[in-house]
Amino acid sequence: IMSLGFGFAAAQKLDLTVDTSNGSFTIGLDGTTWLTGGEVMVGGLSATKGELKVVSSAASEGSDFNGAYLATTLRWADASESPYNASYETVLMETSFRTYPDAPAAIVFEQFFPRTLGADPGPHAHRRGD
């Protein structure tokens, strides 16, 4: 699991927008676009090229060391696995975005890999062309 958090002074506010159909996101700082998401790749598969797809998304609530949060989680799979679904057999990666109502200047990004990449002979196990 990899987590990356951003935080600013308490008077500032980060606004997160996530497109759950394709995984793109934008973060605004006090109403101005500050950061946009880029290419998503896992196991050599590219979302931009249509090789990697969001197969499900979920909203949830919880708490961690930063306090109570609202999360959006996306599950990613190889688009060539037809039909792809949200089962752990096909999901290569989960990405989560956490916002904190009591800390509006904080966002945590998290990646989770439900299985080891490269551990099986499937097309997602290695970079294409290797």
Image (tube, rainbow, N blue to C red):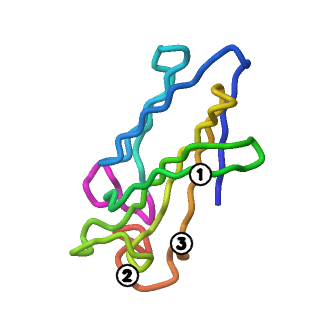
Q: Residues within 10 Å of mark 2 (few under 14, many from 20)?
A: few
In the image, which is nearer the foreground, mark 2 or mark 1? 1
Q: Amino acid at mark 1?
A: Glu
In the figure, is residue 85 to the left or right of 37? left
Q: Which residues are magenta?
A: 42-52
The answer to whether marks 2 and 1 mark residues whose Cβ atoms lie closer than 8 Å is no
* Label 2 or label 3, whichever comes before in sequence order: 3
**74 or 111: which is nearer to us?**
74
Structural distance between the alpha carbons of marks 2 and 3: 15 Å
Q: Position of residue 15 (x, y in %)?
A: 51, 26
In-image side of 118 versus 20 (left or right): right
Q: Are marks 1 and 3 in contact (CB under 8 Å)?
A: no
Q: Secondary structure at mark 3?
A: loop
* Residue 71 percent coordinates (x, y): 54, 47
Q: What residue is shown at x 21% (from left), y 75% (from top)?
A: 82
Q: Amino acid at mark 2?
A: Gly
**On screen, residue 69 above or below 1:** above
Instruction: Relative to 82, say whether 96 is above or below.
Output: above
Kindly indicate the quadrant of the structure image that contains residue 37. top left
Upstream in sequence: badge 2 or badge 1: 1
Number of the label disc, if any, that sits on residue 114: 3
Q: Which residue is mark 1?
A: 110
- The nearer-to-camera label among 2 and 3 is 3
Is residue 16 shown above or below 76?
A: above
Q: How many marks?
A: 3
Q: How far across and how far down the image is residue 40, in percent?
A: 42, 50
- Classify mark 1: helix, strand or loop: strand
Indicate the position of residue 31 as horizontal and vertical percent values.
48, 14
- The residue that disc 2 covers is 122
The quadrant in which residue 4 appears is top right
The answer to which of 119 and 67 lies nearer the viewer is 67
Residue 123 sits inside the magenta stretch: no
